[in-house]
Amino acid sequence: MTIKAKALTFGVAVLTVLGIGTASAAPEGHGARSRLDVVQARGEIRVCSTGDYRPFTYRDDGGAWSGIDIDLAGDLARRLGVRLQLVQTTWKAIADDVGRKCDLAMGGVSVTLDRAKKGFYTIPHLRDGKTPITLCENEKRFQTLEQIDQPGVRAIVNPGGTNEQFADANLKRATIVRHPDNNTIFAEILAGRADLMITDATETRWQAKRNPRLCAVHPDEPFTFSEKAYLLPRDVVFKEWTDQWLHLALNDGTYARIAKPWLG
């Protein structure tokens, strides 16, 4: 064997070990395909959402979905030319369900490093942060974390997401009330069974708009910085396409048109 032939053989062996090769080297249907290709071949995109976080996502007792990100999921599916299938998930399971039960997650998903260990995020579409919501008569009582973290103060939280993580990390003397249904959690404050909730500023504005007895506490100056984005599997091609769709939606008026009825 010549030196040139040996070098070629060695190169092929290295590529084989590294799993690098041409598309024709793998049998049809067995090569590594982007999820973008899979979704188009399927004719359907499956979007995970919790259905309990208005104004982004809501699923009523009859199973009907609504919300900013639900409408945006419909726009994404339309631009991709496929059907939309919404898949119920929970905040605790959302990062594990992406890539397993669905193609991406939408619905007020906060960017966290823990979730980023399991998947990719799109470019962010909203800046947000944790801030309190309480009865308007108590608004001045709960301006700071020091005021909130006091014995006798009841801070209600939905389990499994960033709200619970924030409460566990910052409230050591106050009582944390864990309420399993985020759709009814604000009724607990109205009924006097909790004093406040610390959640994303966007949600506090939405809930205060719906109920004049509730006030968002300094939503323009929240305790934390966070961003909303969509959670994807670890697929560069799929991320690139979804990023481009979101970039266009944010700049061609689509996002503003869909969000306006919810956020004003």
Image (cartoon, grey):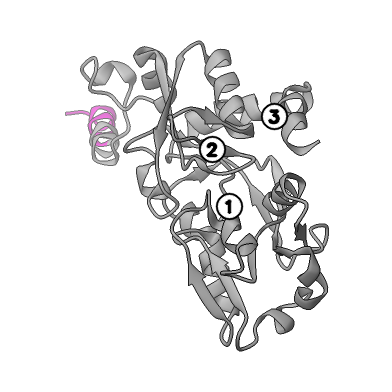
Q: How much space separates mark 3 and mark 2, taking CA atoms?
A: 24 Å
Residue 71, above or below 181: above
Question: Which residue position is annotated with label 2?
Answer: 58
Comparing 245 with 97, the one in front is: 97
Question: Which residue position is annotated with label 3?
Answer: 247
Q: Is residue 93 left or right of residue 242?
A: left
Q: Is residue 106 visible?
A: no
Q: Is residue 248 magenta?
A: no
Three-letter residue code for mark 1: Val
Residue 181, above or below 65: below
Q: Is residue 86 left or right of residue 172?
A: left
Comparing 163 with 204, the one in front is: 204
Where is the N terminus found, in terms of image quarters?
top left
Q: Which residues are magenta?
A: 1-10
Q: Secondary structure at mark 1?
A: loop
Residue 79, x across and y down, in percent: 58, 14
Three-letter residue code for mark 3: His
Name the residue rendered at 45%, 62% in the picture.
159
Q: Secondary structure at mark 2?
A: strand
Three-letter residue code for mark 2: Tyr
* Viewer-side label of 3, 2: 2
* Viewer-side label of 2, 1: 2
Q: How much space separates mark 1 and mark 3, taking CA atoms?
A: 17 Å
Question: Which residue position is annotated with label 1?
Answer: 111
